[in-house]
């Protein structure tokens, strides 16, 4: 499949548990309220992302990516976190899903899996494979990606993350 018209940021994706809406500048305060918890970033390569200036850079990059979403609780409209599509490659028919974080009060429930399922189902209308890049020490995210059926295919370092080792996982369309 080679779809050059893949819209990385549709207006809304939703199911009975969550709603994904395109991330906008005016979401910063509510999203930072969630992101300011240091424990969210404990296993993450960027452990200081709970700091406002560090998070601001992350947020601005998400906005300019044109593939980022605010994650909302479907029933309460409460901000849960954020996620995004990245590195769309039409030639290889793949796209990355990542930069996802959710507030601790939503850990262990259906929220992360529901978020990923919406993104995966949408992406598989346009690509044949999805990539996930997870920090080598981010055991929670590694487990979550494996639960989705993804397979570890590579170990790589990203210069933008100070050369920190990441595992690359791939989920292929059935």
Image (cartoon, rainbow, N blue to C red):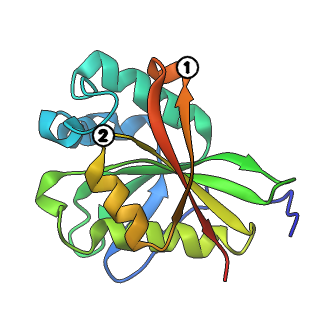
* 44 relative to 127 in the view: left or right: left
Identify which residue, 85 or 28, lies in the foreground: 85
Which picture quadrant has residue 106? bottom left
Dot 1: what SS? helix
Q: Which residue matches tag 1?
A: 159
Name the residue rendered at 83%, 59% in the picture: 5
Horizontal side of 16 relative to 52 (left or right) equals right
**Which of the numbered marks, if any, corresponds to residue 137?**
2
| Residue 7 is at least partly visible in this image | no
> Residue sitting at 42 percent across and 31 percent down?
59
Mark 1 to mark 2: distance in Å?
17 Å
> In this orientation, which residue lies closer to the viewer: 11 or 82?
82
Q: Residues within 10 Å of mark 2 (few under 14, many from 20)?
A: some
Q: Quadrant of the N terminus?
A: bottom right
Instruction: Inspect this view and state whether residue 4 appears.
Output: yes
Q: Horizontal and vertical percent for residue 72?
A: 31, 61
Label 1 environment density (alpha carbons within 10 Å; few <14, some 14–19, many ≥20)? few
Please, what secondary structure does the residue beneath circle 2 have?
Answer: loop
- Quarter of the image for the C terminus: give it: bottom right
Q: Is residue 134 left or right of residue 168?
A: left
Residue, x 23% and y 36% (percent of image)?
Answer: 41
């Amino acid at each position: 499949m080679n779809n050059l018209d893949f819209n990385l940021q549709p207006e809304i994706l939703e199911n009975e548990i969550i709603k994904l809406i395109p991330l906008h500048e005016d979401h910063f305060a509510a999203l930072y309220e969630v992101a300011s918890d240091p424990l969210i970033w404990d296993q993450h390569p960027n452990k200081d992302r709970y700091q406002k200036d560090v998070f601001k850079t992350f947020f601005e990059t998400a906005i300019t990516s044109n593939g980022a979403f605010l994650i909302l609780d479907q029933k309460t409209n409460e901000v849960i976190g954020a996620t995004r599509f990245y590195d769309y490659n039409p030639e290889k028919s793949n796209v990355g899903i990542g930069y996802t974080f959710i507030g601790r009060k939503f850990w262990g429930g259906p929220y992360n899996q529901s978020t990923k399922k919406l993104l995966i189902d949408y992406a598989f209308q346009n690509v044949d494979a999805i990539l996930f890049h997870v920090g080598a020490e981010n055991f929670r995210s590694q487990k979550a990606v494996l639960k989705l059926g993804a397979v570890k295919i590579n170990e790589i370092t990203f210069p933008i993350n100070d050369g920190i080792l990441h595992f690359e996982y791939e989920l292929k369309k059935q």
